Image (cartoon, helix red, strand yellow):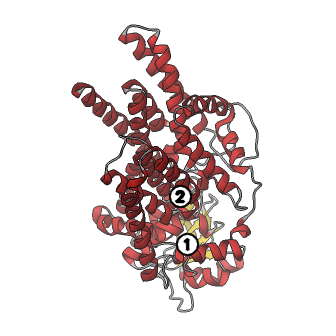
């Protein structure tokens, strides 16, 4: 038993190391922006806390976002800013931190499979979670929804799996992670309620007090944080509901039909959706709580008019873990027909290679913006999310170490799809130019220009370097001071 336990730890460590390698490689090789919130609701606000300057979007002007996650990111930025010149050092640290957190589904998948199937099933399930393309893509993303997904997953594992009856300490930490998830993403409350009902019925009702104590702690601390950073307790929850739901701000960003999340799954997974559902169905006979929670998350978000793929991310680890468990169940049956260790090993690693190939295939067509086309997995769109807006991030990061920068003009690019001061890291004015007339009038105030066209020169500005279609231009003169301009006043007047 001790030897097998040690083997399991070694295998888990190897899988985690390989999964981390994949995540870091993608994070540093494919800079991109899926949605502006990953920059301006988290990284940019962390930069404001750490260094004092940053862009303030409407939701932080209105006080509907929590400072918890931006505060953590800001602390990492402050501590690691000296690792390199410009923004590169602390951005790398943030990516590493988020990528480490992204290993949670790998660990949970491995642990659940180890408890229910054994080491072979754990290797297979953990390996599938380690190589799945959406987990790799979202790993360095500073989305609150993603962090809440990890917190929920830990709570589900601690509460719904393990020894029965659970220890008081385990119950406390179960409640803690449910409470943290509630504060981070209260939209997940229906799933948390289902998980709690399941746990109380399956485990032991008299042990509810430590569960409640753990839950209340992070919720009350979150409310206190809102009161300290804004003006009232739980303002990031109640005011968000009021503005987005009752005032209709949420739907002003676009409304999708109720089935949109199911459409996105079919779009992203193509024909591989059917085997995944089969594997999930096999595992759901024993792990039905995971299937129910995934369905509750998707359905509860389907009733909201405005939809984004990241909102359903908390359901994805549950689905892929289920699919891994279903695959492991089938493989374990096939392995029994092969008596030798070599035969079993071949079956396990052949299955992993098949999942890896399909993950790689689907990663190459990952684009939720394309028109729905239930084509073959190898059919690729014109572009994928792996490259979207990456040039803007690289250009901002490049300018973060440019000592002669005294003002930046941005032409042909929306501010929402740039890196903000989190990537620029220089306290200089940024001008977003609407047209040529605006460009001519504001030229004296910036000596560097970002433009989404590759030409030798733009007026007096000479091309210096290009990043995936976004080019940096420079003129030799210094900048005049514009006392009447500030980027946050510009955003406020634009209502953005």
Q: CA distance from mark 2 to mark 1?
A: 14 Å
Q: Does residue 468 lie above or below 319 as drawn?
A: below
Q: Position of residue 64 (x, y in %)?
A: 56, 75
Quarter of the image for the N terminus: give it. top left
Image quadrant in which you'd find residue 402: bottom left
Quarter-wise, where is residue 346 in the image?
top left
For the C terminus, the quadrant is: bottom right
Rendered view: 239 above or below 33: below
- How packed mark 2 is, by other alpha carbons closer than 10 Å (few <14, some 14-19, many 20 or more), is many
Q: Which residue is mark 2?
A: 145
Q: Are marks 2 and 1 in contact (CB under 8 Å)?
A: no
Label placed on residue 237: 1
The residue at 54%/79% (across/down) is: 63
- Nearest the viewer among 384 and 20 is 20
Q: Quadrant of residue 216?
A: bottom left
Image coordinates for residue 332, horizontal then vertical, percent: 46, 19
| Disc with the residue nearer the chain's start (2 vs 1) | 2
Mark drawn on residue 207: none
Q: Is residue 496 left or right of residue 132?
A: right
Image spot of residue 439 (x, y percent): 65, 77
């Amino acid at each position: 038993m001790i030897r097998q336990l040690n083997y399991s730890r070694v295998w888990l460590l190897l899988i985690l190391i390989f999964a981390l390698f994949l995540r870091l490689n993608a994070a540093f090789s494919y800079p991109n922006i899926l949605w502006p919130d990953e920059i301006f609701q988290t990284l940019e606000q962390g930069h404001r806390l750490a260094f004092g300057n940053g862009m303030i979007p409407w939701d932080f002007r209105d006080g509907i976002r929590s400072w918890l996650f931006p505060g953590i990111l800001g602390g990492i930025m402050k501590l690691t800013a000296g690792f390199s010149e410009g923004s590169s050092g602390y951005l790398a640290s943030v990516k590493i931190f988020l990528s480490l957190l992204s290993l949670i589904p790998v660990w949970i998948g491995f642990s659940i499979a180890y408890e229910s199937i054994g080491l072979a099933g754990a290797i297979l399930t953990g390996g599938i979670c380690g190589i799945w393309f959406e987990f790799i893509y979202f790993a360095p993303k500073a989305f609150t929804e993603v962090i809440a997904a990890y917190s929920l997953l830990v709570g589900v594992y601690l509460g719904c799996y393990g020894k029965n009856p659970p220890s008081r300490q385990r119950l406390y930490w179960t409640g803690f992670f449910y409470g943290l998830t509630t504060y981070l993403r209260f939209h997940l409350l229906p799933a948390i309620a289902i998980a709690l009902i399941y746990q109380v019925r399956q485990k032991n009702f008299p042990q509810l007090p430590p569960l409640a104590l753990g839950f209340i702690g992070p919720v009350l601390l979150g409310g206190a944080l809102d009161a300290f950073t804004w003006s009232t307790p739980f303002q990031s929850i109640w005011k968000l509901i009021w503005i987005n739901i009752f005032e209709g701000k949420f739907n002003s960003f676009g409304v999708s039909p109720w089935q949109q999340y199911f459409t996105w799954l079919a779009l992203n997974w193509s024909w591989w959706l059917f085997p995944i559902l089969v594997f999930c169905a096999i595992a759901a006979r024993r792990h039905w709580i995971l299937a129910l929670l995934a369905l509750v998350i998707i359905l509860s978000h389907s009733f909201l008019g405005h939809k984004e793929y990241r909102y359903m991310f908390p359901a994805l680890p549950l689905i892929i873990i289920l699919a891994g468990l279903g695959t492991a169940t089938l493989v374990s049956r096939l392995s029994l027909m092969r008596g030798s260790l070599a035969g079993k090993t071949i079956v396990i690693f052949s299955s992993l290679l098949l999942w890896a190939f399909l993950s790689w295939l689907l990663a190459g067509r990952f684009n939720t913006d394309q028109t729905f086309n239930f084509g073959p997995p190898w059919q690729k769109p014109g572009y994928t999310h792996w490259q979207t807006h990456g040039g803007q991030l690289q250009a901002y990061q490049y300018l973060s170490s440019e000592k002669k920068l005294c003002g930046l003009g941005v032409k042909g690019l929306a501010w929402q799809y740039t890196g903000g001061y989190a990537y620029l890291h220089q306290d200089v004015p940024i001008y977003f130019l609407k047209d040529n007339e605006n460009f001519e009038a504001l030229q004296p105030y910036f000596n560097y220009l970002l433009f989404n066209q590759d030409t030798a020169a733009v007026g007096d500005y000479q091309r210096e370097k290009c990043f995936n279609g976004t080019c940096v231009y420079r003129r030799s003169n210094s900048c005049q001071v514009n006392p009447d301009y500030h980027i946050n006043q510009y955003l406020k007047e634009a209502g953005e």
